Amino acid sequence: MDPFGILYTDLYQLTMGQVYFRAGLHEREALFEAFYRKNPDYGAHQAGYAVFAGLDPLLGWMEEARFGEEEIAALRGLKSRSGKPLFAEDYLRYLKAMGGFSGLTLRALPEGRVAHPQVPLVSVEGPLLQAQLLETALLNRLSYETLIATKASRVREAAGEAVVLEFGLRRAPSKGGESATRASLIGGADRSSAVSLSHLLGLPSSGTHAHSLVQAFLALGHSEEEAFRAFAEVFPDDTILLLDTVDTLHSGLPHAIRVFEDLRRKGHRPVGVRIDSGDLAYLAIQVARELDRAGFPEVLVVLSGDLDELVIWQIKSQILEEAPRYGVDPDHLLRRLVYGVGTRMVVSWGYPALGMVYKLVAVRENGTWAPAMKISDSLEKVLNPGHKRVFRVYDGRGLATADLLALAEEEVREDAPLTLRHPTDPTKRRTLRPGEFTLEALLEEAFRGGKRLFPPVPLSALRERRDRDVALLDPGVRRLVNPHVYHVSLTERLFALKEELVRRLEGA
């Protein structure tokens, strides 16, 4: 049995399914939405948006996941506290006949696009039992990849035009490393050190060498320079040397320069050096100064070691301030930097879980959608009910100014005034006049009849979506620290429906 098959779920999904089955609700049409409630807050810095990722793996899984003989046998073996079978045979027969998720229709935000809190990323419509059974797998795939793609996007923003390498496979959560690599590349990393995933995504993998190469030579009585020469002889056109095994400035750097000089005499072009510890900004300045003096002004300087977006921002700020004191052009140095980001990207350092949720928002009754509601003492947890459409609103500058949730049956037009209501505060609203805004519908149909509706999207296209959407955000929303809050709004009709349902439930 495939451990990542259709039983890659929580038990309560299956027990609820049996309740629906016994109550005759299992084939009642239902509508669920997946969204997240707040942007990541890493402590010293915060995200003003997210980058949606994980959709392609989810769609592929949905096509293949089935209740077969092994899965049914596994469920048949589960017992209640009294020792009786947990699942009845007629329910198990139904699951086997159902197979997978052929009854579901899934609409989703295109992968790679910018996302915001409370805005549906995925809408799942179909038989209640099937839609319920999808929850765990959907959240598992979408929540983690979105979290990592968001972190990678912030690293990309901090790095500017510099190359960003993803180095995190060794520190990622087991097979989650595959998802982390994919999400990092969608979010903004240029390449990864992970060989298999890079190959599958159509990219060359990137890397240098570890301290252990130098250590092995030293332990056998050789020198650091001999270790560098051995690497350069095997990879003369791909030589990047790690400088800090012994002493970055007084050992690694002079040995690397001598090896680079030999390579140049033989007609090869050295690629770079890497610094993995110490004051990276200061060391980068000193290394760049000596490389320039030796006639290697284009050799790259790769920085690694617990980097994230805030550390990269600090490194760049320090270089801009300090480099001129040592006769180093800061702009030229920044252009030759490469950032190797590992642990802090693939574990979303400071904010380890996105908290994406999957909520029932409507049930089909007598041919129409009856809105479902959940209220809470926490205002952010009060659901936006009903069958909805999602729009992105662009202002006169062409920048995204709000995401708008509307009831599916209502008409939202660009040639009429548009009132945007705050989701929870009745005193906050704004009205846009025709000509001041344009609308873009966000959710697209992605899965129907047991099949995905489009082939896997190339990584390059996913990156282009991310680049385009981030560029259309207000600069305040893109800030690494204390970003401006992007507006998520409801139409007047949806706001009124929400208020009515809250009053009704509170009265009940």
Image (tube, helix red, strand yellow):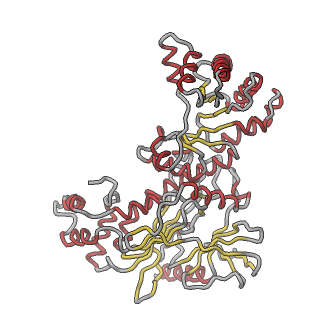
Q: Is residue 205 above or below residue 256?
A: below
Q: State the image coordinates of residue 136 (x, y, percent, origin top left).
A: 39, 61
What residue do we see at 73% from left, 79% from top?
431
Q: Which residue lies most toward the top here? A: 221
For residue 496, say whether it is visible: yes
Q: Is residue 261 above or below residue 500?
A: above
Query: In front here: 390 or 220?
Result: 220
Q: Is residue 339 above or below residue 236?
A: below
Q: Is residue 325 above or below residue 410?
A: above
Q: Which residue lies most toward the bottom here? A: 366
Q: State the image coordinates of residue 331 (x, y, percent, origin top left).
A: 78, 38
Left or right: 344 in relation to 420: left
Left or right: 468 in relation to 352: right
What residue do we see at 29% from left, 54% from top?
2
Q: State the image coordinates of residue 372 (x, y, percent, origin top left).
A: 46, 78
Please tell me in which quadrant of the rendered image residue 47 appears.
bottom right
What residue do we see at 60% from left, 63% from top?
116
Q: State the image coordinates of residue 166 (x, y, percent, origin top left).
A: 56, 42
For residue 248, say whether it is visible: no
What residue do we see at 66% from left, 76% from top?
421
Image quarter (top left, top right, bottom left or bottom right) of the C terminus? bottom left
